[in-house]
Image (cartoon, rainbow, N blue to C red):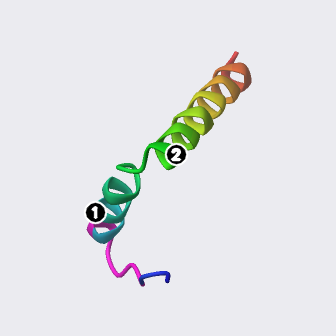
Amino acid sequence: MINKIKKATDFQKYLKKQLEDKKIKKHYDEYDKQLKLKINILNS
């Protein structure tokens, strides 16, 4: 079930809760690395 997010602070709480799951955290971290690399390439 998807909860409605009403405020930015709600999203921060939601994200913190989601990142407690090791599978989700692993994918989040991998995506973060890819995104940072792409940004660095574009800024070069």
Callout 2: SS: helix
Give the residue pinned by disc 2: 23
| Occupied quadrant, residue 12 | bottom left
Residue type at tag 2: Lys
Name which of mark 1 and mark 2 comes first in the sequence.
Answer: 1
Residue range of the region highlighted in magenta in the rendering = 4-9
**Chief secondary structure of the magenta portion:** loop
Callout 1: SS: helix
Q: Residue at x 49, y 81 (%)?
A: 2
- Whether 16 is drawn above or below 34: the answer is below
| Occupied quadrant, residue 18 | bottom left
Give the residue pinned by disc 1: 13
| Occupied quadrant, residue 34 | top right
**Screen quadrant of the C terminus:** top right
Q: Residue at x 56, y 35 (%)?
A: 32
Foreground of the two, 12 or 40:
12
Is the C-beta separation of discs 1 and 2 under 8 Å?
Answer: no
The disc label shown at residue 31, or none:
none
Q: Is residue 6 magenta?
A: yes
Residue type at tag 1: Lys
> Would you say 11 lies left or right of 35 here?
left
- Whether 15 is drawn above or below 4: the answer is above
